[in-house]
Amino acid sequence: MSSTAGVLPENAPTRAETERARWPKYDAFAFISGGATYLDDIEPAGTLHMAVVRSPVAHGKLLGVDVGRALAMDGVVAALDGREAARHLAPMPYVQNPEDIDARTFSVPALAVDELRWLGEPVAVVVAESAPLAQAAAAAVRVRHEELRPVLDLDELGVDPFDDEERFADLVLAANDFTRGDTGSAFASAPHSLRSTVRIARSSTAPMEPRGYLASWDSDGRLTVHASHQQPFQLRWELSQVLRMPEDSIRVVVPQVGGSFGLKMTGFGEEPLVCLLSKLTGRPVKFVESRAECFLGGGREQIHRAAVAFDDQGRLLALRDHITIPVGAASTSPGWRMAYVTAATFPSAYDIPAVEIRSRVLLTNQPPWHSCRGYGKDTAIVVIERLLDMVAAHLGLDPADVRRRNLLPSDRLPHRLPSGYLIDSGDFGALLDRALTLADYRPVKGTRAADPENDVVEGVGIAFEITPEGGGHPSGPLRTAPRPTAPAPETATVSVNTDGRVEVRSGVTNPGGGNDTSLAQLAADELGTTRAMVTVVQGDTDRVPPGTGHASSRATAVGGAAVVLAARDVASRLRARAAERTGARPDEITLVGGRVEVGRRPVMTLADLCSDLHSTAGAADLTATRSYVPQTQPGLNDNEEYRYTYPYVSSGVYVARVLVDLATGKTTITGLVAVHDCGRVINPTLVEGQMHGAMATGAGLALFEESLSDTDGSPLTSTFKHYLLPRANDLPSMVVEHIETPSPHTLLGAKGAGEAGVGGTMAAVLNAVANALGPGCPPPTALPLTPPRVLDLLARAHGSVKP
């Protein structure tokens, strides 16, 4: 209930209670009750619907597109092929410039013009009076093509890219090598070494709500785009480039979003196409992709040919990993950059004297990668953690002891990785010890029989994870010459009305995680007010200051810092005015619980003070705008600073327990424990929710999730019937605790909580299954560990029924 001006709120929390309160999400009830307003719920009068005609082949020459039959259908208003669209639209721009990490750039049109590069690539669009009619008309469009042999499976080429780089030259999008020390000498002199090939399957983000856009133009030529999107200012900049119009002539509005997980960034041709068709028809045009279209994209697929050298105690002496990463067709979506981040994250938090990481990012005729939660860090964690368990098994040691012997001690932080990424802070030993205690961990050699009569065996696995976070590549108004400042700033405006109500406007967006609640909490704490008195405005480029939206776990750590700075400015003015009225010094004034206190004695309500200040000084004195950029890493030049845009690193330890049915190959997770360090925790409830979601994602990627296609590139997982996500009954009750080591690089001491948990859970589950299967079975090194893959491992163990 809102407080009334002039009345002190009852049971107002203290400043410390507000700061640490487990405030529930502002919009939680709207989401769970079906009351949220999503993109598809918005339909102005006269709205037309767009459907996309897609390439029927993975690779080919586009000879022509015949839209005649579609245009002849009743209710069809317009149709465009790539050649016509190219008359109006510039190529899609890169929000993140590939050249900054030595990657190649390509001209990518919104619709294919001459070449078909992947099965499902947009070739033409049709606009009709209804969505079903548009889809029927799209099916009537004829695409003439000459099919060419596609590159879909790198194994079919029969050659390792590192053995014949000349043959792969045309396919290489990027080549990134990171080294430290002399790996050759280290391997030659080491008492032990082992190697393994780790494969991680292509997977989808699979948000509940697919992508969607609604475009309309006003009589003055101004464009408004409603979009289910996580980065409205980047979208506005992209549209200004493709449509060749000023950014300030475009408004992007983001309604409530049903999840994103990296999918809803820039780089999709449908974004400018709805705008163009709205302009050509003079009516609003909407596009909402189908679930099958949503499943076309993906990411994470990688092949790691890795090796480690180590001593008798399990101390790692050298790490070598040659990574082949097929990212699909060229795209301006930032998904391809995940490949760079994977290589740059090695060797995680481990102290390894000699490291050689070589990464080859290859173009194929699969659909382009889009961004995925974890953003490449998750896959690096899977590989290094699998190797550590293999070292422990080789030496007969406890996997926990092997990790303890190799983790960087706190007095070695900050620590720079071979790539240049900086681990800013942490207490890795404390994380490991607490996780092992919380999980009641006991080392298991071989297999413990959980139910011998039913051929079910139990295993336990642990994994350590780091997640570099806080990166942000500026676009549009955030760009500076000759290159953007990195990481990008976040900006917030905080204003207080005459009745003491607070409005926070932020360039951060909220695709469902609840960061608006954290921003409100921070503002309330600085201004000494209550939850009911704070409103947060996000996702409207006309109403909020520029920002990077939602990416890289920076909403609270960076966006929240901007809110705090702006709120402090307003609070300072309020205290100065209160001092004038009471005769006290400003430093004696406290704002708490919606009231003004002098020496813990209430003297007036915050509403009274705000009304007074408005009447004497005006609204300007109760509004402040501040920007915040995390502390950058010392000693970097401009180019390095753009590459190494992660100012803080979260960390955690994950323990998984599993049961593996040897008859069916099914794995059941019976326990998941995480001890996590994301710096200062603002709202424990929201952070735990993020962790639960990330751990569920990691469990799904470890056991179920895989984007499959036929030999011609046709998708085989285009519905949730075939692309399996973990259900509630597939997951145990999760236990999450936090250890806080504040980041020295952020105002609040906060780090990121949005991506942590994916890779750690994947690796812990993988190691738990390996532990269950025991030393008599080949070690599992491919994800996901579906029942057929587990049964294959058992069959390869000389046909034994039990390991």
Image: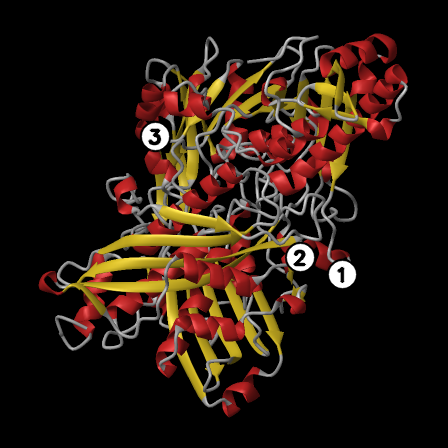
| Residue toward you, 383 or 495 | 495
Quarter residue 568 falls in = top right
**Amino acid residing under circle 3:** Val
- State the separation of the CA atoms marked 2 and 3: 46 Å
- Label 1: element kind: loop
Vertical arrangement, residue 194 with respect to residue 484, above or below: below
The percent position of residue 210, horizontal first and vertical second, equals: 41, 32
**Amino acid residing under circle 2:** Tyr
Q: Can you tell which mark lies on residue 644?
A: 2
Q: Is residue 54 left or right of residue 445?
A: right
Say whether disc 2 or disc 1 marks the residue closer to the N-terminus. Answer: 1
Q: Can you tell which mark lies on residue 669?
A: none
Vertical arrangement, residue 803 with respect to residue 43, above or below: below
- Label 3: element kind: loop
Marks 2 and 1: CB-CB under 8 Å? yes
Q: Residues within 10 Å of mark 3 (few under 14, many from 20)?
A: many
The percent position of residue 666, horizontal first and vertical second, equals: 20, 56
Quarter of the picture containing the C terminus is bottom left
| Residue toward you, 227 or 247 | 227
User: Where does label 3 land, which residue?
Assistant: 141
Marks 3 and 1: CB-CB under 8 Å? no
The percent position of residue 445, horizontal first and vertical second, equals: 30, 75
| Residue in the picture at 33% in, 13% down | 74
Say whether disc 3 or disc 1 marks the residue closer to the N-terminus. Answer: 3
Quarter residue 719 falls in = top left
- State the separation of the CA atoms marked 2 and 1: 9 Å
- Label 2: element kind: loop
**Amino acid residing under circle 1:** Leu
User: Where does label 1 land, which residue?
Assistant: 636
